[in-house]
Image: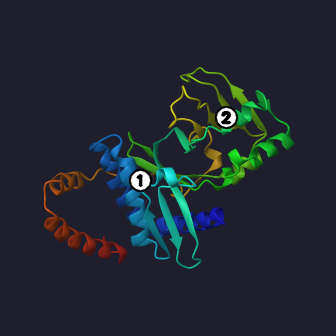
Amino acid sequence: MSDAAYKDFTNRLRLLIKKRPSLIVTTLSNIFTMRLIGNKTHGDLAEIAIAEFINQYMYEFQSVHVGKDLFRAKSKEEDITIHNDITKVNFPVSLKAYGDGPLQLSTDKNFQIYPLLSGYGEKIENPKIIDEVFQSPALAQFDEMNVLPLIYDEKNHRCNILVFDGIKAKSSTALIQKESAGSGRKHPVYKFYDASNNYICEVRYGNATANALQRGLWTHTKNALSFFDSITDGWIDYAHNHTLVQLFSHALVASETGHTDALRIIATDIEKLKNGKE
């Protein structure tokens, strides 16, 4: 159900972006402006921004930013929770803001996936065994990863919202092969390929000597493009909003009363945007 609900959401998001592209351009411009403040700032603020974008502009959905405090209690990886007001279904979404290249799809907090693959040897190509791998608890949610990546090209100031097609990736996997460390890798990886030897994704090593945040399931937006669906139908340009940087700096030394007054003005501006008065 979660996968179907997420698919419906991304389809509706695509329609909104196609109909009102200025809304997402404005939001993405504000998100990536945060990189002027700090290289890591945009990621956390993107979660808040996309949650609010959904609440303001996607009338059939409500969104809540989960926050970091609930991380240890999460049954699934999520940054925001979305509620469909029509179907009454809730589903989690993991939001990523990554450069155009390697993309982490999920972490492996309990270090299950790599040992699972290791148990089958260095090369897995028997279709029945591959199916068995995907049915294991470690990879049971492979085709239900509700990951919404904001892929950005900072040099050219553009963004592509790419959704990894887990169902297609799973059905296309014909080979899972261990590849040794090298090419900048400290640890070996298991790479997934289709029948034409096209790269799909990889499982990175994650024992005690590896960075826990780096372990888990990864892919590459350039090398596995055929396994992604672009919600924005390709790259869209964004621009830095220097006024937003000024607003943040002033807000940090202003009182709550000032913030309340500013929120009233911003709320009025959002209403204008909703009504197409940009």
Which residue: 32% across, 51% down?
A: 239
x and y, in percent, of residue 207 in the image: 59, 30
The residue at which mark 1 appears reads as: 69
The residue at 58%/72% (across/down) is 89
The one of 200 and 6 positioned closer to us in this rendering:
6
Task: Tally the marks.
Answer: 2
Q: Mark 2 points at which residue?
A: 114
- In the current view of this chain or complex, which residue is farthest to the top? 182
Q: Is residue 240 visible?
A: yes
Query: Would residue 194 be found to the left or right of residue 230 on screen?
Result: right
**Amino acid type at mark 2:** Tyr
Asked if 203 appears above or below 143 in the picture, the reply is: above
**Crowding at mark 2 (Cα within 10 Å: few <14, some 14-19, many 20+):** many
| SS assignment at label 2 | helix
Q: Position of residue 17 (x, y in %)?
A: 47, 65
Instruction: Count residues near mark 1 (Cα–Cα under 10 Å), then give few for <14, some for 14-19, many for 20+.
Output: few
Q: Earlier in the sequence, mark 1 or mark 2?
A: 1
Q: In this view, does 95 lie to the left or right of 37?
A: right
Position in image of residue 35 (x %, y %) = 32, 44
Position of the N terminus by quadrant: bottom right
Residue 203: image x %, image y %? Answer: 64, 36
Q: Which amino acid does label 1 sit on?
A: Asp
